[in-house]
Image: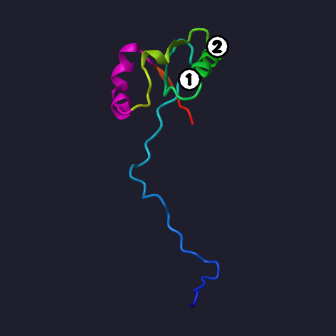
């Protein structure tokens, strides 16, 4: 029986496909959070309730006029219908006067 040797060299294949979507420009950044409304989005996976409470406290100290819409208003952003939930967000955020979003996700 004869064993073939490859002398330690192996063919490798890139596991991902070519990029399917092009890059999009980032949204214009807010000059300040003073007087702005920030929505909190969370996937309910990793201690977001604690993290958002700390973020609120720190941001309110730095920007006294900032207002928050709690993640409970939106429900989980992670579920079987995640795609539909995220696609509907702009229509939900606009009437609430949301200027910015903090999206938290567990890893």
Q: Give the image quarter of residue 50.
A: top right
Nearer-the-camera pick, 20 or 50: 50
Residue at image location 38% in from the left, 30% down from the top:
86
Quadrant housing the C terminus? top right
Label ID, residue 83:
none
Nearer-the-camera pick, 93 or 30: 93
Do labels 1 and 2 touch, CB within 8 Å?
no
**Does 62 appear above or below 3?**
above
Q: Is residue 51 magenta?
A: no
Direction bottom: furthest residue: 1
Q: Which residue is mark 1?
A: 31
Residue 85's x, y, as percent? 36, 28
Q: Give the image quarter of residue 2.
A: bottom right
Q: Is residue 88 magenta?
A: yes
Q: Which residue is mark 2?
A: 57
> Which of the two discs, 1 and 2, labels the residue nearer the N terminus?
1
Quadrant housing the N terminus? bottom right
What is the C-alpha distance between the residues marked 1 and 2?
20 Å
**Does 56 appear above or below 42?**
above
Q: Give the image quarter of residue 89.
A: top left
Magenta stretch bounds: 80-98
Q: Provide the secondary structure element on which disc 2 rests.
A: helix
Residue at image location 33% in from the left, 31% down from the top:
84
Nearer-the-camera pick, 32 or 83: 83
Residue 103's x, y, as percent? 51, 28
Residue 91's x, y, as percent? 33, 22
- Answer few, some or many: residues within 10 Å of disc 1's Cα (few below 14, many 20 plus, some between 14 and 19): few
């Amino acid at each position: 029986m004869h064993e073939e040797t490859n002398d330690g060299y192996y063919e490798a294949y890139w596991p991902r496909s070519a990029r399917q979507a092009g890059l999009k420009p980032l949204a214009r950044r807010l000059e300040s959070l003073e007087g702005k409304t920030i929505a909190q989005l969370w996937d309910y996976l990793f201690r977001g309730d604690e993290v958002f409470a700390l973020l609120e406290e720190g941001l309110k100290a730095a920007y006294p006029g900032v207002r928050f819409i709690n993640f409970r208003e939106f429900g989980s952003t992670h579920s079987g219908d995640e795609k539909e939930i995220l696609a509907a967000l702009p229509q939900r955020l606009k009437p609430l006067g949301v200027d910015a979003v903090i999206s938290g996700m567990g890893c």
